Image: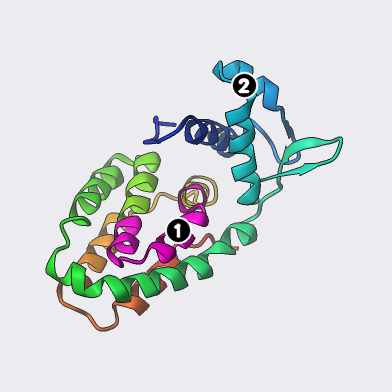
Amino acid sequence: MAPPVVHSLRDQIREHILEGIVSGRWQPGERIVERRIAAELLVSQTPVREALRELESLRLIESAPNKGVRVRDLTAADLRESYPVRAGLEQVAAELAAPVLAEDVSALEPEVAALYEADRAGDGEAQVRHTVAFHREIVKAAGNSVLLHTWESLGIEVWTTLSIRWLSPEPRAHAEDHAEIVAAFRRRDPRIGELLRTHVLSCAPRV
């Protein structure tokens, strides 16, 4: 996995563990040992514990007394659960952000350009990174801190990573769909909220 853009040691450790789950290093039901990860990464156990707690809140792992932390046996149905919630939030975000983005879509355009490049290269990590960044810019443009906090609490990057890399075996292009969203903001499409909602739901893994 390409080095992600992160802002804390906990984030880096979370990405390391997530990569291990996605790649199959840790199989469903297998125990993840906190002190072993700390020794491997040459860090204390505290940020490892924080990263594990975050992944548990996202339902990727589970803990039980005397059994430690184990990888959940996730299915496409599990991954789909967050998408209707996310779609509703992004519908609201698009409607609030529409006046701002109709005037200036410069925050979205670099992400679309990067997605075209990622699609050409078949770079799944870059597809995840720029897809999430694109949608975050829309939510930020809504200018509502509660909305942004709620959206980020869903662990969008984690679920997008799993959806694209784990349960989407066939390569898929992402740039064109996002370019169409930019065009809809530019033309002040009154259906922009519904368009974004439909787009998000279309990205959910198939059961």
Q: Tell me the amino acid under the disc marked 2.
A: Ala
Residue position for label 2: 38
Residue drawn at (55%, 38%), measured in percent from left and top? Answer: 18
Residue at 47% from the left image edge and 66% from the top image edge: 86
Classify 10 Å Cα crowding around label 1: few (below 14), some (14-19), many (20 and above): few
Which scheme is used to colour this image of the protein? rainbow
Query: Was residue 68 drawn as part of the magenta stretch in this picture?
Result: no
Q: Viewed as shown, does residue 186 lie left or right of 76?
A: left
The label on residue 62 is: none
User: In the current view of this chain or complex, which residue is farthest to the front?
Assistant: 145
Which SS does the magenta portion mostly show?
A: helix
In this figure, which residue is indicated by the disc labeled 1? 149
| Quadrant into which the C terminus falls | bottom right
Query: Is residue 142 shown left or right of residue 1?
Result: left
Which quadrant of the structure image shows residue 203?
A: bottom left
Number of other residues with Cα within 10 Å of mark 2, as a class: few under 14, some 14 to 19, many 20 or more: some
The residue lying toward the viewer, choosing from 45 and 21, is 45
- Among all residues in the image, which is located at the extreme right? 66
Q: x and y percent of residue 156 in the render?
A: 47, 54
How far across and how far down the image is residue 108, in percent?
22, 57
